[in-house]
Amino acid sequence: MQSLKEKIQALDAEVKAVVADASADAEQFRIRFLGAKGAVKSLFADMKDVLPADRKEAGALLNAFKEAVELSYADLKAKIASSRTVVPVLDYSLPGSNITLGTRHPLRKVENQMVSIFERLGFTVATGPEIEDDYHNFTSLNMPEHHPARDMQDTFYVSKNPDLVLRTHTSSVQARIMEKQKPPIRVICPGRVYRNETISARAHCFFHQCEGLYIAENVSFADLKQTLYHFVTEMFGADTKVRFRPSYFPFTEPSAEMDISCTVCAGKGCNLCKHSGWVEILGCGMVHPNVLKNFGVDPDKYSGFAFGMGVERITQVKYRVNDLRLYSQNDVRFLRQFQAG
Ligand code: PHE
């Protein structure tokens, strides 16, 4: 009996030492004290040597010890688990991580610039549907069915009945405005347009336009020229020269195409201007009386001018982008070059 008591005391001391040890291993503890070949088991085996008279007391002692060991085991596990919760160590002296700023797409950037130039002249922005009916895209703009001018733009046809197309120009938006609004009208129509062209560095099946329309009393070709000249000097700088060449559009008469002096070589001759010193940037003209009549505007009282330009073209001239496909490839190496603004 005496020896059993002493053994329990010795083991109890050992249990306490393990629980107090910061680096203790719970599993080793369990094997050492509570396992199939552990200390508690071997104490129970020792019971057979205890005299029958002492058995009761020894049994109680042993059970108490076993419970104490089990409690210690639970304690030890809890202590280890709580010591594992990682408290993050913050180093406030580390440099912060960079927040990468997005950039505006070059076409949007140029479109915004174009719109703001015209807004300062009193134009307001108008938008319309990209899937357009034949009437607004063609017929109302003096291009009745079978009119040869329809072939000037390769059209994507959506359906025959109703007659729907992907708009080939944003003149369709101007048609919708003339339908709704009485003169004076002064709108600018930015938007995406579609043409059935093979994709290459110089052509794409979709691109962006910014078209303008001004209808009021006594609007003259001189107003058109001055408005576009103002636009060009704001967009490309005060030294830029313009020239107008007679042209043909079914919805304007007279019609013209406008060139600007080459922004790269200033007229000396380079690849952009194909060594002519001039770069074509837009089409324009006085609104055709038939178009005015189609929308119930009296051509004897009112006159107007219209113009249309490609945003890609203006961006190409301004930023010297030489492949149209870059605009829609979403290559960040290209896009990153248009930081800010
Ligand atoms: N709508 C014409 C085009 O897309 C451009 C234009 C607009 C020409 C207005 C003259 C007047 O080619």
Image (tube, rainbow, N blue to C red):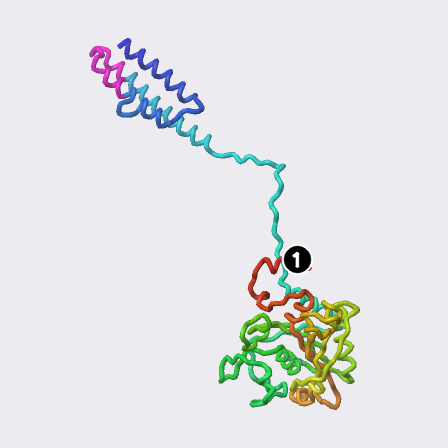
Instruction: Give how far across and how far down residue 218 sits, in percent.
Output: 78, 85
Residue 21 position in % (x across, y down): 43, 21
In this view of the protein, can residue 148 be seen by the observer? yes
In the rendered image, residue 273, in percent from the top left (x then y), is placed at: 69, 72
What residue is at 68 percent from the left and 69 percent from the top? 317
Q: Label 1 amino acid?
A: Gln
In terms of depth relative to the viewer, which is nearer, 280 or 178?
280
Can you identify the residue that label 1 sits on?
339
Q: Is residue 11 left or right of residue 259?
A: left
Q: Name the residue: 28% across, 12% down.
A: 4
Rendered image quadrant of residue 297 = bottom right
Q: Residue 152: which quarter of the image?
A: bottom right
Q: Secondary structure at mark 1?
A: loop
Q: How many marks?
A: 1
Give above or below for 9 relative to 203.
above
Residue furthest out toward the top: 2
Q: Is residue 80 left or right of residue 318?
A: left
In reply to whether residue 42 is colored magenta, the answer given is yes
Q: Quadrant of the N terminus?
A: top left
Name the dominant secondary structure of the magenta segment. helix
Q: What segment carries the magenta color?
A: 41-59
- The x, y position of residue 31, in whole percent, is 31, 25
Q: How dense is the environment of label 1, judged by Cα within 10 Å: few (below 14), some, or many (20 and up)? A: few
User: Which quarter of the rendering shows the C terminus?
Assistant: bottom right
For image coordinates 57% across by 36% down, the residue present is 90
Q: Nearer the viewer, residue 9 or 281?
A: 281
> From this viewpoint, is residue 235 visible?
no
Q: Residue at x 55, y 80 (%)?
A: 155
